[in-house]
Image (spheres, grey):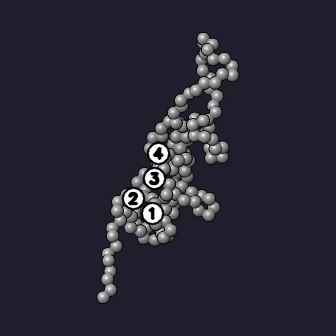
């Protein structure tokens, strides 16, 4: 089932994924394509150029992960540290396809509702207990200790 859903989603937006890939970088706004259009009044002649506005399309139930929470391991695989149900850090290998603003479009490896660690990645290790705080909320101040 998962493969069928992935294939269907990829087919739905094949116009963009077929023309732009990481191995062939192109400017974002210019993508050469070949189209066939009806020309009953012969206004378009061979060799003429046209301008077209082509939408990217929308993907239903897309998962976007913040870029600061996505890293690469030494082998180059895309990974993210996720808070497990037990409150422990868990390293997950994920697949991303492209950026959407300041987020990655996640193809597989994460599910809706997963909490990605975006701060303190240098300190956290897999299976270490973590206390998750939602991004954007001020962290609780550490209690002040005084020595007499």
The single residue placed furthest to the top in the displayed view is 41
The single residue placed furthest to the bottom in the displayed view is 148
Looking at the rendered structure, the secondary structure element under dot 3 is loop
**Mark 4 or 1, nearer chain start:** 4
Q: Which residue is mark 1?
A: 119
| Residue shown at 61% from the left, 14% from the top | 43
What is the spatial separation of the Cα atoms under label 3 and label 1, in whole angstroms? 20 Å
Direction from residue 22 to residue 1 in the image, left or right: left
Q: Quadrant of residue 134?
A: bottom left
**Mark 3 or 4, nearer chain start:** 4
- Return the x and y of residue 36 as percentages of the image width and height: 62, 23
Count of numbered labels shown in the rendering: 4
Q: Residues within 10 Å of mark 1 (few under 14, many from 20)?
A: few
Mark 2 or 4, closer to the camera: 2
> Marks 3 and 4: CB-CB under 8 Å?
no
Q: Which residue is mark 2?
A: 135
Mark 4 or 1, closer to the camera: 1
**Mark 2 or 1, nearer chain start:** 1
Q: Is residue 107 visible?
A: no
Q: Which numbered tag is attached to residue 111?
A: 3
Mark 3 or 1, closer to the camera: 1
Q: Residues within 10 Å of mark 4 (few under 14, many from 20)?
A: few
In the picture shown, does residue 102 fall above or below 133? Answer: above
What is the spatial separation of the Cα atoms under label 4 and label 1, in whole angstroms? 23 Å
Q: Is residue 28 visible?
A: yes
> Marks 4 and 1: CB-CB under 8 Å?
no
Of the pair 27 and 19, the residue shown nearer to us:
27
| Residue shown at 50% from the left, 54% from the top | 67
Looking at the rendered structure, the secondary structure element under dot 1 is loop
Q: Which numbered tag is attached to residue 62?
A: 4
Q: Residues within 10 Å of mark 2 (few under 14, many from 20)?
A: few
């Amino acid at each position: 089932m998962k493969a069928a859903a992935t294939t269907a989603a990829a087919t739905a937006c094949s116009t963009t994924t077929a023309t732009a890939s990481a191995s062939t970088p192109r400017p974002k706004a210019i993508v050469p394509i070949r189209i066939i259009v009806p020309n009953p009044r012969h206004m378009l002649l061979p060799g003429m150029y046209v301008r077209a506005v082509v939408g990217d399309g929308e993907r239903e139930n897309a998962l976007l992960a913040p870029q600061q929470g996505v890293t690469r391991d030494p082998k180059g695989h895309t990974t993210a540290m996720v808070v497990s149900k037990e409150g422990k850090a868990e390293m997950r290998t994920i697949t991303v396809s492209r950026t959407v603003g300041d987020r990655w479009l996640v193809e597989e490896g994460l599910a809706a509702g997963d909490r990605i660690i975006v701060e303190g990645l240098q300190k956290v290790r897999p299976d270490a207990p973590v206390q998750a705080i939602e991004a954007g909320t001020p962290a609780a101040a550490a209690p002040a200790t005084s020595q007499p």
